[in-house]
Each structure stands twice: as C-alpha cells, then as structure tokens.
Amino acid sequence: MSLLVPLGTIAVMMPKRDVIRSLLAKQIPDRIGVHEHFWPHILENAWTAQGVPTDVDWIKRFDLDLRSLFWCCAPGPRQDLAGVVEENAEWKTSRDAWGSTFRYWKQKSGTPEHIGFTCTSPEVWKRDFREQLRSIDPRSVMDLPRMREDYARAMATQEFVTFSGLSVFEELRRILGDVCMLESLASEPEFIEDFCSVITDWHIRYWDVVLREVGRPDGMHIYEDLGYTQGPFCSPKMHCRLIQPHHKRFFGFIKEHKLPLIVHTCGDFRPHLKALHEAGADCIQALEAKTGMDIVELAKEWKDKLCFMGNLDIRAFETGDRAKIRDEVTYKLEGMKKARAPWIFMSDHSIPPTVKVADYEYALELYRAGCRY
C-alpha cells in the first residue's frame, strides 16, 4: 500500500509551475520542489514485478513538479552507416548514423558501453559529416503536428514543462568518443572549435523552429556530462577556452527567449561550476553524491546564484534500510531549508531498478512531511 499523501492534503501550497519558476529564479517559494528520473528498465522489469502498471505516468503517480518534453541531439548525416551490429539475450550492439557503435545492456540500467567511432579526425569530420549536417533542415527530423499535440497536452497539466536536449560536450563524447575527444581537446583545438561551432549552430536552428512553430515551454533542460567520479574530463582553463564560448552562445539563445535553464551534468564538475553559471545556467542537476558533492556545503557559496536539483545519495536508497534513507533525506532537507537555498528534491542521477518502490515512496513521504521552507 502506498504511503504517499497528496500535497494538497498537507496544506494549501503554491502551484507546481510557480514553485519551480521561483526556485529557478533563485527565490524561495513555500516549499522545496520535487522531480525524478526513472530508468526504463524499472518499467520493464523490477517495478512491474512489484505491481506498478506498465503504462504508468511516473510524474502523476508520484505527484512530481516537472515534465520533460522532446529531445534534440545532432542527427547523424550518414544513414548508410546505421544498423544493428550484433544482438543476443543480454545486449544489443548498434551503430548510428555518425558511425558510433554502442552496446546497450538489456537487463541493466545505465549508459551504454562505447565500442567504436568513425568521426575520429578533422579530416573525416570535414569529408563525411560537417557539411552534410549543415545541410539537414531541422524540420526534416521533426514531426511538427505530433509535437504540437504533445506540447498542448503537456502545457495543460500543472507541471513545469521543459524541452530537453544535448549541448556540445555531450555531442563530442557521443560522436567522437571519449578517447578522441580528450586527445583532440589537448592536441587539435581547431578541430574541437569547428565541431562545437557547427553543432551549436544545429541546436540553435533546431530550437528556433520548435519555439516558433510549436510553442514556448516553461524552461529548458540541457544535458552535458562534464565529468566522471574523480573529476571533470578537462581542466577549467581548457573548458573556458574551448567549451564555454559555445555554451554562452547556445545558452544565450535560450536566455533571449527568457527561458530558465537547467543543466544536467554527471560526475564531479565542481571546477566548472563558475563557468556554467557565467554561461547562463540557472539550475544544476544531478550532483552525484558518490563524487563527494554535498548540496548543503555547495549552498553556502552558491545559494544566491544557482538552484540545485538532486544529490540524494542513491546508495542509501538501494540499501532498503529506512534509517539510512531517513538520515540522507532529513540531512539534505533540513540543511537546505536552514540555508534557505533553492533546491529541487531528487536522487543524485536516477532511480535504478535496485531501489524498491516502497523505499522510494518512503523517501517521498519524508519529503512531503518536511518540504516547507
């Protein structure tokens, strides 16, 4: 039996959109916001065995505040390269239209394994991909009638609606692969600058069409994994030279439309936090606890400059130990309330299938009992 109590039964609170809008403006509403991401494997395996319907709307089931819509990544220009390479009961290996090959595990959550890449030199980029991408009309990869329907349906709900997509660093990793990307950052900066410029052009062209011909959301949610568990992929100096100018241009386009911006980044990106703020980020998500990040500590410096989303240590949730879950939730709830720092309650990345439904519901019960500032 669910332990969840509808928010309205606790007290009359601000509408969801107003709560998130205030937090992203670095203001303090009447309560902390709440959001979550769920691995699709939960729907297919672990949580269906616990009685969760396969057609569940996670946002409504858990009474969350944000709803994400659409997804943009630069389309591969070489459809002749795309296809399934190998598949068995455990995994599927596929090559996309960038010639990038990934292995996707069927029974496990997480990011895919990098197998191989085609676009690994400036020569290949210029010969096979650069102009081909520039020639793609964004409308050719959109279903505008369907997008308008989805947009109207989402905006009719109470949730704060974001449009989502990638930016340059995540595109570098996806198209060049980590090894080529890291080597090129150090040895071929002109290649990186040209790649990022063309990719940023693509994203601005795409979202310009969406905003003009579909509609304006409540905000944007951009995904940009800048680090791993031990630190960022590149130095702050390299980031500011090669990546931040493209962030400023893309994020500046978003700001011209007066849209608040949430930036997702995995790993320990703390050395880049100042640059992300300067580029226009209003909120940072997901703040992985296992990297050593602690929002209560981060809020001491950043509470007037940034909203934070996430940082609840999923390892505590995975234990199923209610005392450990309570300690983790209470420490961060009370710490952020005491600091009067803008925060959106969320795990430090996603809810994996190793977390039981009842344990996640228990965390939400604790949130709802103590979410008021």
Image: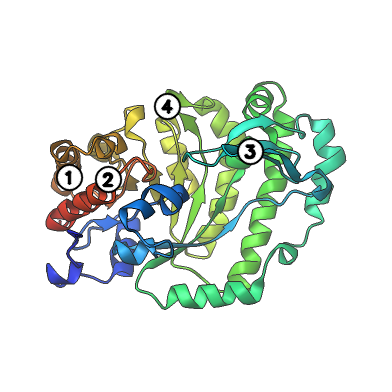
Q: CA distance from mark 2 to mark 3?
A: 48 Å
Q: Which residue is mark 2?
A: 303
Task: Tell me the mark number nearer the camera, choosing from 2 and 3.
Answer: 3
Q: Residues within 10 Å of mark 3 (few under 14, many from 20)?
A: few
Q: Secondary structure at mark 1?
A: helix
Q: Residues within 10 Å of mark 1 (few under 14, many from 20)?
A: some
The mark that comes first in sequence, 1 or 2, is: 2
Q: Nearer the viewer, residue 237 or 196?
A: 196
Q: Secondary structure at mark 4?
A: loop
Q: Is residue 45 left or right of residue 303?
A: right
CB-based contact (under 8 Å), mark 1 and mark 4: no
On residue 88, which mark appears? 3
Q: Residues within 10 Å of mark 2 (few under 14, many from 20)?
A: many
Tell me which amino acid carries mark 4: Thr
Q: Is residue 279 visible?
A: yes
Q: Which residue is mark 4?
A: 229
